[in-house]
Image: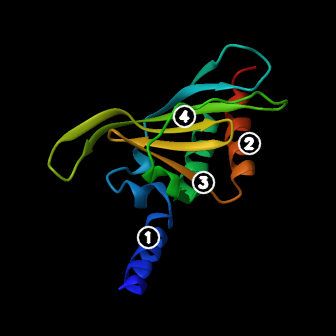
Amino acid sequence: MAVTALLGVVAFAFVYTRPLIIEQRYPVLDLSQCTLIRGYFNDGTGVEDIPFAIAPDDPRFGDVIELVQTAEFRTDLWNILPKGTKFHTYKEDDFKWLVRLRFEDVLFPNGDMGSGDMLHIHNFFGEVELFFDGSSAECSVKNQEQWLEDVMSILVQGSD
């Protein structure tokens, strides 16, 4: 019986933490249908967050979509525990960003339609969290540090 329970826990952990691309995690979202990317970033050079909006005709739009589309998000096991308040002690070269992807007329399985900033990807100083349809999940991405920097470099390009 103990072996069966242990195998069940291992199987749960394996399935729960398997890496998935956004369209596998959230099948109702087709990233090619994203109509706007907006949010904010803070590159550590100032106190204020810097807002941005990237329209589909901006070359950065496709770059952000590609980075989001190809990333495999692995859900952290810590998500099964209650969440507390996040805090961060600032270090040199720290940065954070929030990317919100807007969609129009998304059809949900229950027949409802949804529009708006439906998918949020939040980098809180190296910790990644996904928000969709009222739920959130802390995740990791393969080569996460580089991926976070790649997204940040695209966002900063338009703030000059």
Q: How is the image coloured?
A: rainbow
Residue at left offset 47%, top offset 75% = 10
Q: Position of residue 26 (x, y in %)?
A: 37, 54
| Screen quadrant of the N terminus | bottom left
Query: Label 3 belongs to which residue?
Result: 140
Q: Is residue 121 above or below residue 87?
A: below
Query: Label 4 belongs to which residue?
Result: 99
Residue at left offset 53%, top offset 30% = 85
Pointer 4 local density, CA inside 10 Å: few below 14, some 14–19, many at least 20: many
Question: What's under tag 2, amino acid-wise?
Answer: Glu
Query: Label 1 belongs to which residue?
Result: 15
Query: Label 2 belongs to which residue?
Result: 149
Q: CA distance from mark 4 to mark 1?
A: 27 Å
Q: Secondary structure at mark 3?
A: strand
Q: Position of residue 33 (x, y in %)?
A: 40, 45
- Identify the mark nearer the N-term, 1 or 2: 1
Give left or right: position of 83 versus 51: left
